[in-house]
Image (spheres, coloured by chain):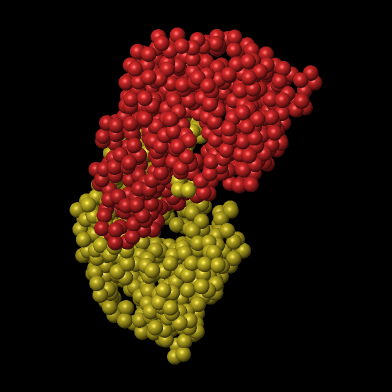
Chain colours: A red, B yellow
Amino acid sequence: MRLLANGVSVKVTVSLLAATCMATAAAAQLPPEARTVRAEVRAWRERNEVPIVRELVELLAIPNLATDSVNIRRNAEWLVRALERRGVAARLLEVEGSPPAVFGSLDVPGASRTIVLYAHYDGQPVDTSEWTSHPWRPVLRSGPLDRSPRELPLVPEGGRYDPEWRLFARSAGDDKSPIIAALAALDALRESGRRPTVNLRFFLEGEEERGSQHLRAMLTRHAGLLRGADAWVFLDGPVHQSRRHQLVLGVRGVAGFQITVYGPNRALHSGHYGNWAPNPALLLAHLVASMRDPDGRILIDGFYSDVRPPGPAEREALRAFPDVDPVLRAELGLAASEAGNAPNAERILLPALNVQGLSAGRTGALTTNAIQAEATASFDFRLVPEQTPARLRELVVAHLARQGYHVVTEEPDSATRSRYPRIARLVWRGGYPATRIALDHPAVRSLAAAIEPALDQPLLRLPTSGGSLPMHHFVEVLGAPLITFPIVNHDNSQHGPNENLRLRNLWDGIELLAVLLARLGAVWQPQS
Amino acid sequence: MRLLANGVSVKVTVSLLAATCMATAAAAQLPPEARTVRAEVRAWRERNEVPIVRELVELLAIPNLATDSVNIRRNAEWLVRALERRGVAARLLEVEGSPPAVFGSLDVPGASRTIVLYAHYDGQPVDTSEWTSHPWRPVLRSGPLDRSPRELPLVPEGGRYDPEWRLFARSAGDDKSPIIAALAALDALRESGRRPTVNLRFFLEGEEERGSQHLRAMLTRHAGLLRGADAWVFLDGPVHQSRRHQLVLGVRGVAGFQITVYGPNRALHSGHYGNWAPNPALLLAHLVASMRDPDGRILIDGFYSDVRPPGPAEREALRAFPDVDPVLRAELGLAASEAGNAPNAERILLPALNVQGLSAGRTGALTTNAIQAEATASFDFRLVPEQTPARLRELVVAHLARQGYHVVTEEPDSATRSRYPRIARLVWRGGYPATRIALDHPAVRSLAAAIEPALDQPLLRLPTSGGSLPMHHFVEVLGAPLITFPIVNHDNSQHGPNENLRLRNLWDGIELLAVLLARLGAVWQPQS
C-alpha cells in the first residue's frame, strides 16, 4: 500500500493499519539509541567545524536571486556536486522560465521508507545599502549586530568556533544553512560507521523567495521522480522563539482581495454636497464593519461552515509551548490582544480576515473638505483546512450582494454607475488553501519518535504556522504529507538586511538531522 | 431702538413693531418703480460699457494674493480712490499682520436705514501653468473655454459687448466684479438723477481667500465704525445654476477633525498575527460606522438636541427652486443620492458628518500583508443653528468613550499604549458655528421687496448655503443681520484656473444693485 494518496483524509485508516503492524516492525530493526548517535555526531562535528563552515561560506558566496539566471544556476550546479560527493545521485530538474530545482537520490539497502528533504537555495532580494557587510561576502561576528559584535576571521585560531558566533550573509538563515546541515549529517553518519535507515531524496527549490511561480509545473512534470515519499521534511523557517525545537504541521492558506466602493464620479465639496452625495469612505467603513467584528469573528454568512475546528489534540499540543504572548504584547505596546488575550497559537488555528489597508482621499495636512469619488480597502483571508479560495469568493460576493452592492470586477463605466446605487469592485489577488497534517499522523509520530529522545526538552508540535506558503501544491500534485522541521535561529533577520545564522543552530541541526536519518526508518512501523 | 443686537433672536419683536409703523412709512417716501429704475440704469450702462469694463480690467490687473503684501495694498489703495471718485468717504482699516480692509461711507440726507456692502478684493492662489492666459492679465473671450471661444480686443469696435462674452482673470468671478458693479450702480443712479435711499457703507476685505485670519480682530477694533447697520449685504458667490437671482440667508458652520486609532507599535505580518494583534483599520471602520449611517443620520448620542429643525417656511422657499438634482445626479454618475433622493437643498438644512479621508497602510499594488500600526480618518461636521463646535467636541469625546476608547490629543507614548486596549487620538481643526437669518426677517423682506419687482422671474430665497464661511464673526461682534446677494455666473471657475465673468452677469448686477439702492430705504418700514 502506498502511504497517503492524500495526507489528510486517509490518516485514520493508516493509523489503524500501523498499529496492527507495530510489534513486527520493532522486532525487525532496533533503532540506534538517540543520545548515542547525537554524541558521536557532535564529536565528529567538533573535529570538523572548519570544513563545515568553509563549505557553508562557499555556498553563501554565490549570489542567489531567482531572477539572476546565471548565478542561480551556479548555485544549483554547486549543489549537484556537493550531493554527488556524498554519493547522492543528483541532477537538475528543469521547467521553462524557472531556475532549476536540484534533485538528489540516495537509496539505502533494506530501507522501506522514503523521505524527501526540501529546502530552497534562492534568497530574498537585497538592498546592499542597508547591510553592514556585503550580503554575498559572508562575515563571522561574535554575536548579533545589536550587541556590537567583533568581526572575526572565518577560520579561527585553534579551529573551534564559539557556538554563539554568527555568520552573516543572505540565506544564512533562509535557507542555505539547512542544506549544509543535511550534507554534514550524511558525512557524520558515514564517519561514525552508520547510515540512514530511510531512502533519501533531496528537492532543493530555486525560486521560493520569488513566489514559487513554476513550482506546480516542476512537481507535475517530474512527478514520476517525486511521488511516493512517505514524508516531505521541510527544512525551512526558524525554531521557536524560546530556541526549542519544533515540528510545524501546517500553514494557513491565503486569499488576498480588494474592495473599492464608489461615490460621485469626481470629488465634491463636502459643504455643498454633504448629506446628499453618497460618501464612499463612510460606505466602506460600514462594509468593512459588516465583515468582521473587533474580536476577529467573521460575520460573513456561511463562513464557518467549511472550517475544521481545532480539536483537543491541537489545543493539548499548544499547551506545551512557552507562553510568549505577554512578552510580545509588551514589546508591541499592546495593552491587550484580541478576544480577551486568547493565545496567539490558538488564534492561528482559526481563519482570519485582516484589513491590510484603507484609502480614500487624504488625511493629515493634505485633507481636503471633500466627499471622495471612491474608497478602497485591501484584505487578506488566512485559511484553515477545509476552506478553499473558490468557496470564499462565492461567500464574499454573496455578502456584498446582501449589503446592497452590485459587484463588478472592473472599474465601473458611467452606465453602470448611473444604474446601481451601490457598486463594489472586487479584485482577488490569487490565493491557495491551507495544509495541515494531523498530530497523530504516522509521519508526525515517527519523526517525533526519531528526534525527541535526543533533546533535553520535549519537542514542540505546532499544529500550524500563521503564515502562508503554497504547500498545497505538494499535497495536490504528489499526495505528500508535509512536516516542517526548522533548525535556524528565530532572530536570523530572515528576508531583511544582515541575515545571519547562529552557529549553535547549525551544530544542533547537523546532530538532529543525523539522529533523524539514523533512526527514522527503524522507529517507523513497516509498510504493509 | 437699534435694530437687531442679535439678528436672529429679536426678529419677532421687530416684525411686530414694523407692522405697526408700515402705513406711516409708505406714506413718507414712495419707492421709485423698479422697472423704471432698471431701464434707466440699463440705458446708462449701454452707453458706458467700455469705461465700466476698463475700470474692472484695471482692478483685475493688480495681483491680489493676501500674502503679497505690496500688491494687496495696491488693490486697497486703488479701491479707496475709486470710492472717493464717487463721493464715498474712504479709508483703510488696519490690524497688525493683515492686509487692510477698505471702508467707505456715504450718508444720504433723509435716509433712516444703513446697509453695508461686503465684498473681498483678494483672490485664491494661482498656478499659472494651468491657466490659458495669465491670471492677472485680463482677456476677453467670446464664451466659456469649453466652447473654443475667440479671443477679443478689450475694447470692441462700436463700444458694445455681446453679453455672453466673458472676461478671464483671477477674481473676475470671486470677488472683484461685484465691487465694480456697486461702483457703477452709484454712477448710474447719479447720472439718472437718482440717489440711494439708504446710508451706504462699504467693507471690502483683503484676506477672505486666506481664511479671514484677522477678520475678528478687524471687526472688533473697528466696531465703532461698523456696528449699527440694518443689514450687511454680501456681494459674493454665484447666482443659482439656473441663472436666476437669489438671496442666500445663511451658511453652515464647520468643525473638522481627525481620529487615529492604534494597533501594535509596528506593522505585523498578517499571517502570524492576524486574529491576535488588534487591527486598527478594522477598529476604525467600526468606529466610523458607529458615528453615521449610510443615509446621513448621525448616530452620536445627543447630536440632534442642539439642532434647530427646518420649518415649513424654509421648505416652502425651497419649492420655488428649479429641481437641478436629477441633472446633477446624471452629471455625477450617481444612480441615487442619499436618503432616497431627498432634495440637496433640503439635506443642506440638516447637519452633516462627512468622512473626508481614510488611511491605513496601502492599497493597490503597494498593499502589504500586514496589520498596520495605526489607521486614520478625517472628518468634517457641517453645522446648522444652534450647534456649536464646543458642544460637538464634547459629544464626540463622549461617543469615543462609549465605544471603549481612551481619548488622547497627542501621539500616545508607550506607557499609554500599554495601558489602554483602545486608544483614539482626536485632533480638531478649529471650527465655527452656522449663521442663518429667518425668511421673514425684515431685512430679507425689504431686500426682496426692493429687488424682486425688477426681475422677470421670482427672486429665490435659499435658507442656507451648504458651504461654510466665518460669517458668525459679523453676528457675534457686530450683531449684524447678513444676507448674501450674488451676481456672478455659477460657471465662473471660482478658485480654479481660468476664472471668468460672463458680462451679462455684470450688467444685471449693476442694474439690480442700482434698483436695490434706489428702493431699499423706501420699501423698508421706518424705525420706531
Using the image, determine if residue B496 lies above or below residue B375. Answer: below
Using the image, determine if residue A37 lies above or below residue B505. Answer: above
Using the image, determine if residue B300 lies above or below residue A235. Answer: below
**Looking at the rendering, in which quadrant would you find the C terminus of chain B?**
bottom left
Q: Quadrant of residue B198?
A: bottom left
Furthest residue in direction front, as rendered: A109
Q: Tell me which residue sits at (43%, 62%) in the image.
A: B118
Observer-nearest of A7 and A379: A7
Q: Tell me which residue sits at (42%, 27%) in the image.
A: A481
The picture places residue B349, in percent across and down from the top left corner, at 28, 52
Furthest residue in direction bottom, as rendered: B158
Using the image, determine if residue A90 lies above or below residue B242. Answer: above
A140 sits left or right of B137 in the view: right
Observer-nearest of A361 and A515: A515
A319 sits left or right of B413 in the view: left
Q: Quadrant of residue B78?
A: bottom right
The picture places residue B121, in percent across and down from the top left corner, at 49, 65
Count all numbered tags in the image, as a single digit. 0
Observer-nearest of A475 and A252: A475
Q: Tell me which residue sits at (46%, 69%) in the image.
A: B499
Q: Tell me which residue sits at (47%, 70%) in the image.
A: B498
